[in-house]
Amino acid sequence: MAGKLQLKKTPMKEQPPEERIKNFNEVPYGYTVEEAIAEANRCLQCSPPPCVKGCPVNVDIPGFIKLIKEKDFRGAINRIKLTNNLPAVCGRVCPQEDQCEKACTLGKIKGGEPVAIGRLERFAADWEAEHGVETPEIIEKKDGKVAIVGAGPAGLTAAADLAKMGHEVTVFEAFHKAGGVLVYGIPEFRLPKSIVEREVENIKKLGVKFEFNRVIGKILTIDELLNEEGFDAVYIATGAGTPRFMNIPGENLIGVYSASELLTRTNLMKAYKFPEYDTPIKVGNKVAVIGGGNVAMDAARTSLRLGAREVHVVYRRSRIEMPARAEEIHHAEEEGIIFDFLTNPTRIIGDENGRVKQMECIKMRLGEPDSSGRRRPIPIEGSEFKMDVDIVVVAIGQSSNKVLLQATPNLKLNKRGYIEADETGKTSIEGVYAGGDIVTGAATVILAMGAGKTAAKAIDEYITNKKKR
Amino acid sequence: MAEIVSKEKIAENIYSVQIFTPLIAKKCKPGQFVIIRLDERGERIPLTIADFDRDKGNIRMVFQVVGKTTLQLSRYDVGEDISDVTGPLGNPSEISNYGTVVMVGGGVGAAPVYPIARALKEAGNEVITILGARSKALLIMEEELTSVSDELLISTDDGTKGKKGFVTDVLKELLDSGRRVARVWAIGPAIMMRFVSELTRKYNVPTIVSLNSIMVDGTGMCGACRVEVGGETKFTCVDGPEFDGHKVNFKLLMERLATYKEEEKRALENYRKSIEEEGE
Ligand SMILES: Cc1cc2nc3c(=O)[nH]c(=O)nc-3n(C[C@H](O)[C@H](O)[C@H](O)COP(=O)(O)OP(=O)(O)OC[C@H]3O[C@@H](n4cnc5c(N)ncnc54)[C@H](O)[C@@H]3O)c2cc1C
Ligand SMILES: Cc1cc2nc3c(=O)[nH]c(=O)nc-3n(C[C@H](O)[C@H](O)[C@H](O)COP(=O)(O)OP(=O)(O)OC[C@H]3O[C@@H](n4cnc5c(N)ncnc54)[C@H](O)[C@@H]3O)c2cc1C
Ligand code: FES
């Protein structure tokens, strides 16, 4: 097998851009068995493997790739699932270029690309979906009762792990569906909702109970969960759900959306199928999306698919500072999204009915690096200009949702308004743990999952000790 | 899932339903609302909790048929389920003994006024209620409001019952009569809340309005419900729904309520057509 080293990744087939901007179907098709094996063959099986260190949940990467190589696909997926409960999701949305693939030896040699670890992970997960899931047997029953608040990746991971450890787990979710950002934020064409549903079904099979339409802080408080409902511990995983606005004039005009609203209407409520589904959405002719992260890319590509003629991404820094995943930027460019770099909105202008008509922007230049290490954008005086737009989508970030926090005044928060928790997720209230975006601020799926895993272990220990007392 | 346990048409196009949601019934307070989604394809719409029975586990909602979802709900029968009910949402009304309070309920807004008036009455206030509607046939909640009010005044636009005119005419008379009014609550169409607020501002009477902006999640996660209060942007679902009427930008509220006019018309027409086809 020691043939010539294949320097580049085995390509993954995709829907062509001209086609895909007209539908919401997933863009990449995923590897076939042959492609997956070809790609797995590229792995050098380094020891110690640098890639594993790049993975926040330490998936045994060389291990599962070796099993793919040996055509033991069941073995491969089981190996991944030892540490990752949502492989079909992670294979699709993790920023691999900053994590496992960044550390890959092949990527370090001249002209080389790392092994496509994410694509292989996706392959293994999709193989399992097609061939049936083996539900692990829960070996030992424990008598802990845990409430999880929020069914995003952090909450789902903690729930699954605690259930596998034998605890009785109930997930309380504010929305009518589980998945968090995976169902209301990340679009169908990037992460089909059927995949999230599949993963949630697997978690249900572990015995986890879900209570939907339950906004904790309103219907029940943390205190009530612990002291009246009989839970031994609570895990708060409510995410960073509150959209930020720019506080510029005109931001409440009709046609200005937060990315969260645009995406929730489209993904969770299926507004792209209006009027078959009841929730409406305004379709723009010319859309400006403000921001440079994954959320901005998703909003821009969604707007295009909803039927906008022209979509701009307006970003105050330059391309290299954009925090979005490389693949998303690449896909957006292929689809014809126009990037206006070094540009910052100063006000939004409406017509006589209060609808967006134009947006005024100012040109920026980059100065010295700021606290984030990125070069600070500075406005260029007198460079204001107007662009005609009818929809503006604000995607400049999220902050913590206050509903639960306000109802829990004894829960200590940090300066940025997120929950203060130690590395195991322990908070200032006994028996209450927290993790994911509600602790770190908006981050990534895999980090949220990592937090869920660590907390599950800590909660298990806490309950075991408590029962001994 | 929540089962409809009673349903009644209480005026032209206005219905009252009770649903079985024990936990919400146990927790809710006057001034709060729920968000319902009728079925898998449904929109999430907010409705105020117009009454609750903690023992039976029911909450009551009173709604006016204005579009697709409310029309669809009006066609549900007792025994049928509403797929999703989330709540209680929003901040409860601030109940305290203010002295004399005037409760102004316009149209379907009379329903949310009821539990607030009742709580204020229980807190020791003298409660004067002004109930308004376009016409006698559209007046609702008269009996309930009478039971919790020291005085009930009625106005109809066409004069078919009570004073001919708007609720603001009745309110103005009351304020002019020299009665000391400590606080006004006004709930109803945006335009009514605006006129009430403009009037009471002249008399320096603190006025609370309950805003009905368009919502999606109802938990502060989308910003659809943005309103301007005192020049600042607020989210109605988590910062409200009650605000100081003297500070609300009603023009913006009314513009934003019209965001989906065309889409709503289309959805309603489509639905009407599907009902007709079903009926054939
Ligand atoms: C549009 C978008 C695109 C993204 N793309 C990527 C990507 O490509 N790759 C990547 O790694 N990351 C991406 N992210 C970030 C990633 O999705 C988040 O970091 C991750 O979902 C955080 O997980 P979480 O479990 O902490 O919270 P969330 O996923 O936010 O889930 C929180 C859950 O808690 C529920 N909840 C909130 N309050 C309450 C309450 N009081 N009671 C009950 N339930 C409550 C919410 O409804 C929600 O379901 C993206 C984020 C967005 C918004
Ligand atoms: C906090 C709150 C409490 C409310 N309480 C009541 C109540 O007790 N009784 C009652 O009859 N109505 C109430 N409403 C208004 C009610 O939600 C709307 O009438 C309903 O959403 C209309 O839906 P539709 O599909 O029938 O009509 P549509 O044709 O969709 O809309 C008709 C009008 O209703 C408004 N509307 C549409 N969608 C929404 C939405 N998702 N959220 C809010 N408003 C919307 C718009 O102004 C629109 O022009 C309340 C609204 C809010 C925000
Ligand atoms: S309804 Fe979404 S933030 Fe208020």
Image (cartoon, grey):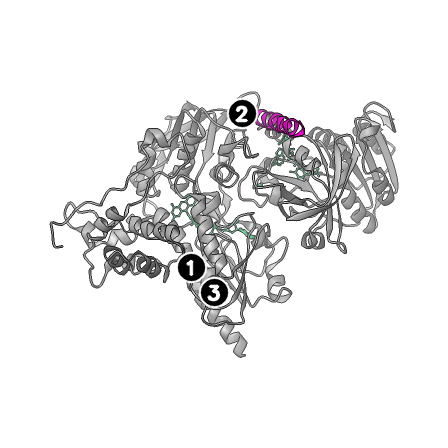
The answer to which quarter of the image holds residue B115 is top right
Callout 1, which amino acid? Ala
Residue lying farthest to the top in this orientation: A352
Q: Nearer the viewer, mark 3 or mark 2?
A: 3
Residue A414 visible in the displayed image: no
Vertical placement of residue B113 versus A229, above or below:
above
Residue lying farthest to the front in this orientation: B280
How packed is label 2: few (under 14 Cα within 10 Å), some, or many (20 or more)? many
Q: Which residue is mark 1?
A: A451
Q: Which residue is mark 3?
A: A162
Which chain is disc 3 placed on? A
Residue drawn at x 84%, y 50% as measured from the top left? B124
Q: x, y percentage for residue A466?
A: 53, 75
How packed is label 3: few (under 14 Cα within 10 Å), some, or many (20 or more)? many
Q: Which residue is mark 2?
A: A355
Q: x, y percentage for residue B265?
A: 61, 25
Q: Relative to the observer, which residue lies in front, A339 or B88? A: B88
Q: Using residue A436 as the reference point, say whether residue A61 is left or right of it.
A: left
Q: Nearer the viewer, mark 1 or mark 3?
A: 3
**Secondary structure state at the residue bearing disc 3:** helix
Instruction: Answer with mark 2 or mark 1, whichever residue precedes in sequence.
Output: 2
Q: Nearer the viewer, mark 2 or mark 1?
A: 1
Q: Using residue B6 as the reference point, say whether residue A424 is left or right of it.
A: left
Q: Main secondary structure of the magenta part?
A: helix
**Secondary structure state at the residue bearing disc 2:** loop
Residues in magenta, as a range: B262-280
Callout 2, which amino acid? Arg
Q: CA distance from mark 3 to mark 2?
A: 49 Å
